[in-house]
Image (tube, grey):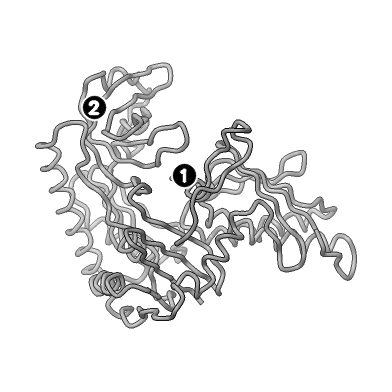
Amino acid sequence: MKQIVVHGHRDETTVALLEDGKLTEFFVERPNVRKLVGNIYKGRVVNVLPGMGAAFVDIGIEKNAFLYIDDLLPAHLEHQPKVKPSIDTLVRAGDELLVQIVREPVGTKGARVTTHYALTGRWLVYMPEAGYIALSKKIDDEEERKRLRALGERLCRDKEGVILRTVANGEGYEALAGDMDMLRERWRRIEEKAKRAQAPSEVYADVELLPRLIRDIVTEQMDEIVVDQPALMEEAKRMLRSIAPQLTERVRLHDGKKSAIEAYGVKEQLEAALQPKQWLASGGYVVIDQTEALTVVDVNTGKYTGSTNLEETVLTTNVEAAEEIARQLRLRDIGGIIVIDFIDMELEENRRRIIDALETAVQKDRTKAHIVGWTKLGLLEMTRKKVREQKDMMFFVPCKACGGRGKIRTSTLT
């Protein structure tokens, strides 16, 4: 069973995604925690670094944004020069550029920006200057892929590009064309505003938290959307009427004495998820240790002693740990390099089963993850796209007394 639980409190909105009662994704929108990915700015180049193939761009936020040369070159590989030029032949300090944020500022690093613009709709992602058509990898039926690619070719004009999202599976031309027309008009308005704007300034911001999540994650498989504020419930229904009217009846108002996040165990689960040690149902546990660039996960049998033999005990713990690790990565929004120290196994077949279990679990993740494989030391390496700051940074700050080795709790759910 899949549920979305929405809690409104003063000027804060909390949204949780539950799968069979387990918290898998969690979002908070506050005045000081504003999502920037997808926003478009008219910026001014501050500094160009040929040795790094990058430039710093002032977009009007606290830290200058980082622009790689690959994000200046044409998006379509066929249109790129055979020999990559030096970045200082493409931009100079003082140049004004229209850029889009693709990664939030994290720690001491500013936002990463691109000139490969993309606007997300319900069924597709519109890329006004990309010149190519792509499909979600989660659409695996070959005939459906051919059909959608043909529709994409009909939809695009001139140098336009499009990505057909997973939810486009089975949709007809009229629905996709309506999405395309809406996004094309949005891009026209962005260009008009950019012409009038003074750099640095924001020229486009993506929709707020609740409408964005309804657009991105609500499908026929969503069983229930529970909201504890009438205004937010109407907002959810209004969004659904425009994209999936048949799902509006699944929105209901929570009117209990407790808030929705308390009644559905979200608050309790999040508190537990922020702890380094995560217990498994069998009695084993995983320990998650995060740094700015690397996350290390250690798997232990803990209280679980098994019933047959050591190899079977270890396998059971590792499989359960793989599923929990995938959930924790989504919930905490952990990105970058991840190294997992599973309990050692003798059989190669069992090592393969661990990778299969992890691959199956990360398929539920909307953020791209890649499992690299086992190292010579028996560690499993994987990566997960880093888009925004990890969730625990919303509730903790580095401890000044110990130089950042520890963390201090700064806030809690309301």
Crowd band around label 2 with a 10 angstrom C-alpha radius: few (<14), some (14–19), many (20+)? many
Residue 84, above or below 105? above
Asked which secondary structure carries label 1, the reply is: loop
Single out the residue that lies furthest toward the right: 309
Residue 100 visible here:
yes
Quadrant of the image occupied by residue 290: top right
Q: How many marks?
A: 2
Q: Residue at x 21, y 69 (%)?
A: 174
Quadrant in the picture for residue 398 = top right
Element at badge 2?
A: strand
C-alpha gap between disc 2 and disc 1: 25 Å
The front one of 29 and 174 is: 29
The spot of residue 396 in percent (x, y) is 53, 46
Q: Name the mark nearer the viewer: 2 or 1.
A: 1
Left or right: residue 24 compared with residue 341: left
Estimate how packed mark 1 is, as few (under 14), some (14 to 19) or many (20 or more) residues with alpha carbons within 10 Å. Answer: some
The one nearer the camera, 234 or 293, is: 234
Q: Amino acid at mark 2?
A: Arg
393 left or right of 183 in image = right
Q: Position of residue 79 (x, y in %)?
A: 30, 34
Q: Position of residue 219 (x, y in %)?
A: 39, 71
Mark 1 = which residue?
A: 389
The quarter of the picture where the C terminus appears is bottom left
Give amino acid for label 1. Answer: Glu
Task: Tell which of 349 and 375 is nearer to you.
Answer: 375
Q: Position of residue 95 (x, y in %)?
A: 21, 23
Q: Are marks 2 and 1 in contact (CB under 8 Å)?
A: no
Earlier in the chain: of badge 2 and badge 1, it is 2
Q: Which residue is mark 2?
A: 44
The residue shown at (53%, 57%) is 331
